[in-house]
Image: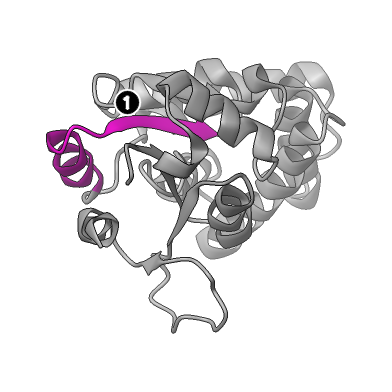
Amino acid sequence: MIEAVLFDLDGTLLDHESAAAEAIVRSFPDADPAWLVMHWSDLTEEAVDRYLAGELTLDAQRRLRIVTLARELGLGDWDDARADAWLAEFLPRYRAAWRPFPDAAGALDALAARGLRLGVITNGDAEQQRAKVERIGFADRLPVVVASSEAGSAKPDAAIFRTACAALGVRPGAAAYVGDRLATDAWGAVAAGLTGVWLDRSGDPAPGDLNVPRITTLDALPGELAV
C-alpha cells in the first residue's frame, strides 16, 4: 500500500529546460538559438554532474559553464569576476522563467485528496530548489524537500531516497518516487526499496525491459498508483 509519493523537481514538476532555454537565448540574442540552447544544456549537465560528484562547488560549476560558452562564442577568456557579473544577470532571468508543467498541480491535488504524503527529492542546491518549489506555488503541497546538498548523497544513491522516506515518516516500501530520468530516478528508487515510476515526456516509443511503470504525463500518475 502506497502511503507517500515523492517527486523529482526539474523536468518532472518544474519545466527547467524551457526556463533555461528562455534565459540563455535572452542572454545571447545574436547567437543561433537552436545551437545555443542545446549546447548550454550539454554544458549544464556536464558541470552539474561534476558538482554532484564533489569535484566543483556550486559557484564553480556555474562559472565553468559560462566561461566555456563565452570562449566558444568567440568572446575571449573570461575571469571569475566577469563570469560572476554575467551570472548576476542570467540567474534572475532563469528564476523569472520558472513554471510548473501544466499537469503537475492536478496530479498533486489528486494524490493529496487520497491522504498521501507528498515530497520532493532533488539533486541540487537546497536553497535554490526550495525557492523553485515556492515560486511555482507548490510549497504547501510539498512540505518535505530533500536536496542532495543537505542530504550528503545524490540520486541514484539509495541513501537520499531513504532520508526522504524517513522525513515523511514512511517505510521505503510504502513510498513511490516519480522522475523523468529512468536510471537516476525510477531505477534508483527501486534499488532503494521504493516503487519507481518513470515520467517519459519524450513521446518516443517505450524501450523494452523497463522493469518500472512508465507514464507520459503526470495526469496518469493517480491511476497508475491505484493499480
- The residue that appears at 41% across and 23% down in the rendered structure is 168
Of residues 175 and 41, the one nearer the viewer is: 175
Image height of 16 relative to 41, above or below: above
Residue 71 seen from this side? yes
Residue 180 in picture, x, y percent from top left: 48, 55
Q: Quadrant of residue 162?
A: top right
Q: Say left or right for 171 vs 190.
A: left
Q: Quadrant of residue 111?
A: top left
Residue 153 in picture, x, y percent from top left: 71, 29
Residue 38 in picture, x, y percent from top left: 59, 60
Of residues 164 and 56, the one nearer the viewer is: 164
- The residue that appears at 27% across and 61% down in the rendered structure is 224
Q: Quadrant of residue 57?
A: top right
- The residue that appears at 54% across and 34% down in the rendered structure is 122
Of residues 225 and 14, the one nearer the viewer is: 225
Q: Say left or right for 2 vs 90.
A: left
The colour style of the image is one colour
- Answer few, some or many: residues within 10 Å of disc 1's Cα (few below 14, many 20 plus, some between 14 and 19): some
- The residue that appears at 15% across and 43% down in the rendered structure is 110
Residue bearing mark 1: 142
User: Does the segment drawn in magenta span residue 108?
Assistant: yes
Residue 126 in picture, x, y percent from top left: 55, 19
- What range is drawn magenta here? 104-123
Image height of 214 relative to 3, above or below: below
Amino acid marked by disc 1: Leu
Image height of 175 relative to 183, above or below: above
Badge count: 1
